[in-house]
């Protein structure tokens, strides 16, 4: 694989990781919003239940109690829907975390491969340089021997 193609693959992996990071950020925001919404719904449900208890203790009429009870049931349904939204947001958050982890691993694999290719190229360049230096040393040695022989 040429360095150019490896660079392109690495850039694509980096872009995929960035996209996964953006998805995770979106999922975190959605989870936080779902959590805050559930807190508000739970607070409203508890307030409706408290109102029902207070009205019962005050001796409110049956029609009023039925209306307040209907409000409590609506609040309970809204809270259940909020829990479902929070569960869905939690699952989406976990999927986004997994996707980011996978994208990071894929990028790291290409980076390690790039580093190995660079190391192999550097080692090959060093071997070529060593061969040239050995050849030069061999030629110098041969010259020095022939100069000594010529002097004798």
Image (spheres, rainbow, N blue to C red):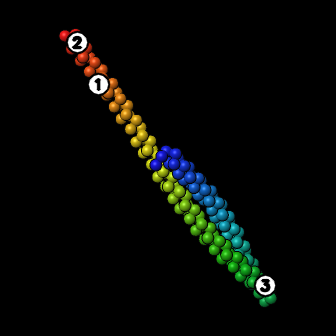
Circle on res. 67: 3
The image quarter containing residue 81 is: bottom right
**Disc 2 secondary structure class:** helix
Q: Which image quarter is the C terminus in? A: top left
Tell me if 101 is positioned left or right of 28 in this view: left
Q: Which residue is mark 2?
A: 150
- Asked if disc 2 and disc 3 are in contact, CB closer than 8 Å, the reply is no
Which residue is situated farthest in the bottom direction here?
62
Residue 72 lies, in percent from the top left, at 72, 80
Q: Residues within 10 Å of mark 2 (few under 14, many from 20)?
A: few
Q: Position of residue 67 (x, y in %)?
A: 78, 84
Residue 25 spot, x, y in % from top left: 63, 57
Which-is-in-front pick, marks 1 and 3? Answer: 1
Give the mark, 2 or 3, whose residue is nearer the N terminus.
Answer: 3
> Residue at position x 40%, y 42% from top?
120
Kindly state the secondary structure of the residue where label 3 is placed. Answer: helix
Please say whether residue 53 is visible from this viewpoint. no
Residue at the top extreme, as displayed: 151
Q: Secondary structure at mark 1?
A: helix
At x 49%, y 55%, the residue is 105
Q: Residue at x 53, y 62 (%)?
A: 98
**Residue on which disc 1 sits:** 138
| Side of 27 where 110 appears, left or right | left
Check disc 3: other Cα within 10 Å, few if <14, some if 14-19, many if 20+: few
Q: Say whether disc 1 or disc 2 marks the residue closer to the N-terminus.
A: 1
Between residues 132 and 147, which one lies in front from this camera angle?
A: 147
Q: Is residue 148 left or right of residue 79?
A: left
Q: Is residue 132 above or below residue 9?
A: above
User: In the rendered structure, which disc, 1 or 3, sits on the residue that comes first in sequence?
Assistant: 3
User: Tags 1 and 2 in contact by the CB under 8 Å rule?
Assistant: no
């Amino acid at each position: 694989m040429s360095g150019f193609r490896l660079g392109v693959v690495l850039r694509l992996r980096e872009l995929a990781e960035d996209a996964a990071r953006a998805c995770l950020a979106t999922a975190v925001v959605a989870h936080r919003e779902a959590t805050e919404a559930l807190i508000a719904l739970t607070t409203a449900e508890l307030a409706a239940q408290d109102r029902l208890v207070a009205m019962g203790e005050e001796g409110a009429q049956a029609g009023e109690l039925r209306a307040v009870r209907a409000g409590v049931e609506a609040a309970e349904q809204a809270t259940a829907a909020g829990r479902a939204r929070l569960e869905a947001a939690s699952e989406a958050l976990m999927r986004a975390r997994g996707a980011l982890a996978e994208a990071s691993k894929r990028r790291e694999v290409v980076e390690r491969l790039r580093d190995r290719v660079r190391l192999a190229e550097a080692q090959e360049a060093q071997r070529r340089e060593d061969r040239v230096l050995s050849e030069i040393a061999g030629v110098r040695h041969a010259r020095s021997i022939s100069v000594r022989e010529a002097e004798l």
